[in-house]
Amino acid sequence: MSADDIDGTERRLLQSIVEVARHMFGAAASSIFLVDPDTGDLVFEAVSGEGEKQLVGSRFPMGTGIAGWVAVSGQPMVADDVSTVSQFAQDAAESTGYVPRTIMAAPLIRFEECVGVLEVLDRTASRSELDDMEMLGLFATQAACGLELLLRVRRNRQEVEHPDPRELLRRIGERLPGRAGRRDAAVVRLLAIASDLLDH
Amino acid sequence: MTPTSTPPPWRREARAHFPGVPAWGLATTREAPESFDVSPLAEVTREWAWGGSDGSGVRVCVVDTGVEGAHPRIGGLERAVEVVREQDGGLVLADCEPVDPTGHGTACASVIKSVAPGVSITSVRVLTDGKAGTGDALLAGLAWAIDEGYDLVNLSLSTTRSGFREALHELTDRAYFRRCLLIAAAHNMPVLSFPWMFSSVVSVASHDEADSMTYYYNPAPPAEFHARGVKVPVAWPGGREIRSTGNSFAAPHIAGICALILSKHPFLTPFQLKTVLYLAADNTTRPHGETHVR
């Protein structure tokens, strides 16, 4: 599989997640943020419905507003009557270019960690708030599984094609101590040769 | 209940225990059991439990994202602290401004105040950024609250990281024995998280009725009680109010009710308090307060 294929699949998956989320709830818009593992920022990845598509790629600091709470707590949440609250209007306008009346958000959890947030703005096809939150949570779990699989494929490929030398050394270092076998001795000799090569 | 100079037995320094010192037995034939204050449980009705109470004298700690102390629905805090990460990676608690960048802690505190306006609230901010993770800051903040002797701790958050499970277990047991009752929100998704699933805490999920004093005992735990958690009017930073849904807002209803009870019956132990909650729940009482018998 080429690099372009995986990127294309990830894009389509992200877009599909927001499209389905929006249609499930007859919502005005749905958007998805992923957590940047290096900075902790929320990165705006895709939007369906109302909103500014050109904002895809922009970043927001973690820990502010509804999406921030969902990301740090790993919990879904529903907030109503937010249009009167200027902070939300501002947040929402910044994130999607659309000012909602209600926001519903659920975390994308991979193993034990929140890797993103799925938001649904102004839903109309609502059964009840508890059911809505439950359903969004279930769907977010499925979406996170899809993203996880893609991430694994990407990581495996990166490791085969361009191993990160520091990561490689760290992993070798972790497995070396405590094993005084012949194979370890051979590994140490190989590392010594590598060090010699770098010296000259 | 303000800490006094002579700590009650349950707030004493934990004694050392190792082979060679006496164990936990008490030879009542030669030594009388120590005397202590008791809140006896007579006929428990809602009126008995919290009639006339406003939560005065009860100290509640909200372990969350911070609390906006100046919000009219909060009306000031006893204290505001936050978990700070030091350069060596260690965590310390430091006094901070009574602010809340996320809004969640303010919302929870306002629910407690709406039920028990007389309580004194302290905020411990443990959720600051996602990078730090929730586990170790939660642990540090919770340990602080337990050691500071708060009567009740509202915990509308949990960690999904199983690595913290054992440490949290020890901490919640410690709280239980020190008469610090933890009221913890059940996770809103069917994932494993802690410490709300432990039996030493009072765990709360949502019902969808619009009454703040209606709550149910759940005979099929782990969530032991159901309290108001749908479209709850809550305070939001900037002096505002929104309606919000989630177990996060159900837990502070029970925390508020616990404060009402504890204010009237200050020597209830955590297990007695949970029993009173059980006996006064809407599905265990009849209209006149007598307990249901099936």
Image (spheres, rainbow, N blue to C red):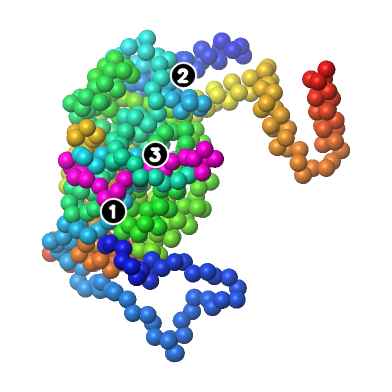
Residue A169 appears left or right of B149: right
Q: Is residue A189 above or below residue B159?
A: above
Disc 2 marks a residue whose amino acid type is Leu
Label 3, on which residue?
A: B127
The local secondary structure at tag 2 comes to helix
Chain on which label 3 sits: B
Rendering quarter of residue A44: top left
Q: Is residue B260 above or below residue B79?
A: below
Chain on which label 1 sits: B
Asked if badge 3 and badge 1 are on a common chain, one would say yes
Q: Earlier in the sequence, mark 3 or mark 1?
A: 1
Label 1, on which residue?
A: B60
Q: Is residue B285 magenta?
A: no
Can you tell which mark lies on residue A13? 2
Q: Is residue A1 visible?
A: yes
Graded by Cα atoms within 10 Å as few (under 14), some (14 to 19) or many (20 or more), the crowding at tag 2 reads: some
Graded by Cα atoms within 10 Å as few (under 14), some (14 to 19) or many (20 or more), the crowding at tag 1 reads: many
Rendering quarter of residue B29: bottom left
The local secondary structure at tag 1 comes to strand
